[in-house]
Amino acid sequence: MRVTTIHGTRDIRLEDRPAPTIDAPTDAIVKVVASCICGSDLWPYRGENQITAGDPIGHEMVGVVEEVGSAVTSFRPGDFVIVPFCHSDNTCPHCRAGMSSGCENVGITKGGQGEYAKVTQAEGSLVKTDGMPDESVIPSLLTLSDVMATGWHAAVAANVRPGSTAVVVGDGAVGLCGVLAAAQLGAERVVAMSRHEPRQKIATEFGATHLVAERGEDGEQQILDLTDGVGADAVLECVGTDQSMRTAFNIARPGSTVGFVGVPHGVELPVGRMFSRNVGLAGGMAPVRTYLPELLDLTMKGAINPGLVFDLTLPLDEVAEGYRAMDERRAIKVLLQP
Amino acid sequence: MRVTTIHGTRDIRLEDRPAPTIDAPTDAIVKVVASCICGSDLWPYRGENQITAGDPIGHEMVGVVEEVGSAVTSFRPGDFVIVPFCHSDNTCPHCRAGMSSGCENVGITKGGQGEYAKVTQAEGSLVKTDGMPDESVIPSLLTLSDVMATGWHAAVAANVRPGSTAVVVGDGAVGLCGVLAAAQLGAERVVAMSRHEPRQKIATEFGATHLVAERGEDGEQQILDLTDGVGADAVLECVGTDQSMRTAFNIARPGSTVGFVGVPHGVELPVGRMFSRNVGLAGGMAPVRTYLPELLDLTMKGAINPGLVFDLTLPLDEVAEGYRAMDERRAIKVLLQP
């Protein structure tokens, strides 16, 4: 089968590899219907994460069950499923407590940017739709495997409340989904920090009531002005750099929480400021499976349309161009069709 | 009047200084009935904080109102009051949101280890008792000015829930008050990490159900064993060092929160672990005034007796010995009588 592999900095290839096989009774093989490139895939692409040359890449996908192991009883070949990027058994104490990304048997989708992928803990991880979904909804369903659930996690971790002012730092696909999540969770004012017109437009469609184009101190001042000097009730940090984290803490009001979902790179947390201002930090790797039933319901009834984050669709053969487009910010998020 | 001053490392003096005066209509002067030495006073005492030689020291006190400014209408001379270590107007957006330590007009008690102290924002800060309290309850009332409210804040920030397992890192007076708070908030298991027999005894009186004497990895392993490998539902970090913070994060279960109230010294937060395990951090300088009504009620009806943390009472004249006793861990917490 064809699968995307990474060989070094900015070296993405589509290669022929053996299709994955059932190795454990809890495994399932899913034929990919749609996958995509994650902002976090750009870290190894840019050489900022260690890689093993030749590793398959890609962890966001939806597809059709091809084969299941003997312990997988709720799914069968032909089911259309959303595959959470992190697999979980849905029975361990962490899953039961709603933190499925901390599952004792956690796994991660590998090679999702390909034709077939293996899901470990398939019984606990997969969520199926009622029959084959309409093609038009597939982009939105695809976002539920990671990016939309991650934006949702940022909003939940930041404790977005009805009537509050939420600020989203970062206008990547996760940040845009964070805007959508904050609006869904009832924030009265949702501020998107974005300077890119196409992203501003999606943010507005997703429910942003305010746009702040400035960065750094200027942007922070705008947030303070907007809130009469009080600061934001909730801040969603959706980047993962030291600068974005600092901005997040600089605009968060005392007693509030920064919800963070950007994989931290070079972040040094301002513990002294956190202490003196009583600003907390919560979040991390999103418990996708935990949120999936609710997000699937919202998507199927049309309450959210997170698939709007895809502004470029490419055949899998052109995956390398997809990476280039995202790296150069020519595309917000790239959907791949095998 | 006599007041305690700090002149350098381990150089504490009792000196004669002019009594404080009303400088603003929001001020009040309180005659000290009892004050005490805070664990955080030991940082400058040990030379680990910058000081200005000769500065008055001490921020925990109860006393009797001596004089009030013209804007202070709810208090008059003769009222017995608890003085939160941080003063707040109780009307600004942060106070109204329950984060009085983030007050736009925040102040801090200075020279509380003396005969008289000034309270800025007296109207919003002070809380009075019904008449003069019995002498026996004064130590407990004194703890409400800081240490008990701070332990409470750790438990609230860590989101201690009924039926949960809470672990308290640190067996200083704040940690012990954290044990008391976690038990009051309904934790089913309260684990005190303490190796000192007198502190273990108070922890047990305060509601600790388990004691862990080991530190570092051994202590962490004990917590994991106690929780079947899951980790604690809530962790109260009541020290403020890098080691205690690391222990806190190592024993917190995924999705839980470390509540921190120890002024951080040399702490580098493990942001990568926080992300991968979804363990949050919340807390900081306690909003004492916010908690005071509830804590005063619990104290007056005898539901809590936090004054047990005082194991040494000295006349103010012997304040330098009080610092030595706490520095050398001969005393848990020293009460000073002017």
Image (cartoon, coloured by chain):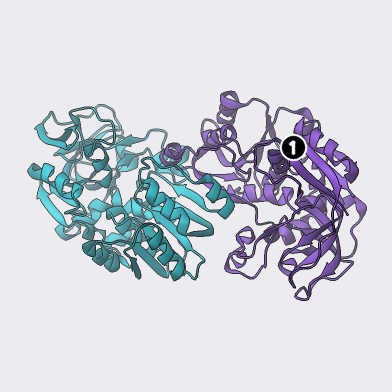
Chain colours: A purple, B cyan
Quadrant (top left, top right, bottom left, bottom right) of the N terminus of chain A: bottom right
- Rendered location of residue B30, percent (x, y): 20, 40
**Which of A229/A251 is in front?**
A251
Left or right side of A327 for B296: left
Quadrant location of residue A80?
bottom right
Who's the residue at 81% across and 30% down the image?
A330
Tell me the subunit letter for badge 1: A
User: Is residue B338 among the parts visible in the rendering?
Assistant: no
Give above or below for B167 relative to B105: below
Who's the residue at 62% across and 26% down the image?
A215
Left or right side of B105 for A188: right
Per the image, the residue denoted by label 1 is A203
Who's the residue at 53% across and 53% down the image?
B279
Who's the residue at 86% across and 38% down the image?
A312
- Rendered location of residue B107, percent (x, y): 33, 35
Quadrant location of residue B265?
top left
Residue type (three-letter) at the residue carrying disc 1: Ala
Give above or below for B282 relative to B108: below
Q: Few, some or many C-alpha atoms within 10 Å of disc 1 (few <14, some 14-19, many ≥20)?
A: many
- Rendered location of residue A114, percent (x, y): 84, 51
